[in-house]
Image: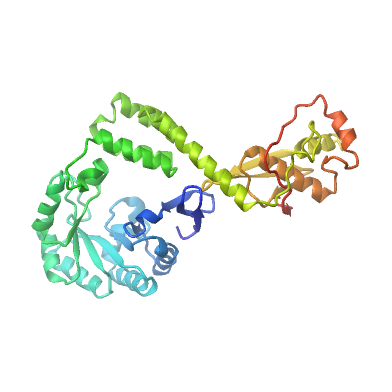
Amino acid sequence: MAQCQRVENEVLQTVDFVAPDDRVMFRTCERERDRVVFQMGTADPDRALTVAKLVEKDVAAVDVNMGCPKEYSTKGGMGAALLSDPDKIEAILRKLVAGVSVPVTCKIRILPSLEETISLVQRIQKTGVTAVAVHGRFKEERPRHPVHCDYIQAVAQAVSIPIIANGGSLDLVKTNTDIEEFRKATGASSVMLARAAMWNPSVFSSQGLLPVETVMEEYLKYAIRYDNNAFNTKYCLCQMLRDKVESPLGKQVQAAQTNAEISEAYGLQEFYQQTQDQLQARRDALQSDSQPDRPVMDGDYPPQITPKMFLLEWSRKEKLEQPLYETVQRSQDRSFQSTVTVAEKKYRSTLWEKSKKFAEQAAAIVCLRVLGIPEGRIGEEDSADIQQETETSETLVVSGNQSSCCVETGV
């Protein structure tokens, strides 16, 4: 997250935090801004603050995970590894509390003794955090071990800030009514659920659990609407399937590689296509609105010629290797940008296009202009000669708005 940029995705109407390789590491939206808490794994106060300041305008609070016992977390000094370094815990939390405008919380596991646990939480309270979640298991314990409600209760009585009880899934929390029972048993202010909520998110509904089939379908619609990563979608659906993960539906979900394929497994192909059409229409409208003055290719070029074909024929005349196009797609809005290599030099447009075809044409235009070569527009010198040479060649017909763009050479 520390390497991400905040991007407002107008197509999805989301806020995306995008890594240098264009992966969306975190996506949120206005609807959940006052509800979603951003939990981070960190072992460094400065880096923690960098990330917290990056997201603080888009989340309700920032939380530090000090309870994860998994090796991928602890080997970096994060998660439960912090429990043995209270000085670092204090440094991280004080830095965050002083540096951001939203509430700061943290989640811990209980320590080997009750006295140590209470002492740590009292020290955490002095940093100014808003609340502390306490997972009622020791670092080495796993979900199969019973949760220690007595530890959580003792902590809640020892401090004045809210304590959030965690660890009740499966044994203690199966329905919405169980949530309040778990809260009372621990004396906590509220309850945090992970596995129970992943198995069936409607556990939070006071109206009672919905059939998991209904919940999976509703979840998948959200995943499609917000272009969720397909592998994350699969993971969440498999959590809901639980012991049915090896059923025909479960196997179809596991084999799927895209949200479109997952939609097919649930019979939501029509919904998927309608959503894609709506997003594409929004994408086209936004591109049209944001680039009203871009030159239009239609009418400027002879019917048998495009900049890309013109560049190809020029390369042949010059006895150069065929132009090589490399195209990438930006995940946040699915726009394309192409780089063309000619005579071992690379050329690309700085603008992003709505299709791969347009992106390649834009790169060709940049190359032609940098090299001072006619682009094939009607009335340009040499256009007729090149057109005659390409009459029997396969051509690309370009429609819609196509631009000549800013130039980047030596990329």
Q: Residue at x 21, y 38 (%)?
A: 210
Q: Work out whether residue 13 or residue 173 is closer to the camera in this orientation and state it.
A: 13
- The image quadrant of residue 115 is bottom left
Q: Work out whether residue 188 or residue 87 is closer to the camera in this orientation and state it.
A: 188
Height in image: 406 above or below 144?
A: below
Q: Report the side of 28 relative to 332 (left or right).
A: left
Q: Work out whether residue 108 or residue 333 is closer to the camera in this orientation and state it.
A: 333
Q: Report the side of 150 relative to 319 (left or right).
A: left
Q: Residue at x 28, y 25 (%)?
A: 247
Q: Residue 314 in the image: x percent, y percent?
A: 84, 37
The quadrant of the rendering that contains the N terminus is bottom left
Q: Report the side of 207 relative to 129 (left or right).
A: left
Q: Residue 99 in the image: x percent, y percent?
A: 39, 73
Q: Residue 336 in the image: x percent, y percent?
A: 61, 44
- The image quadrant of residue 151 is bottom left
Q: Report the side of 111 relative to 340 (left or right).
A: left
Q: Residue at x 17, y 48 (%)?
A: 206
Whether residue 391 is visible, yes or no, is: yes
Height in image: 154 above or below 411?
A: below
Q: Residue at x 43, y 35 (%)?
A: 259
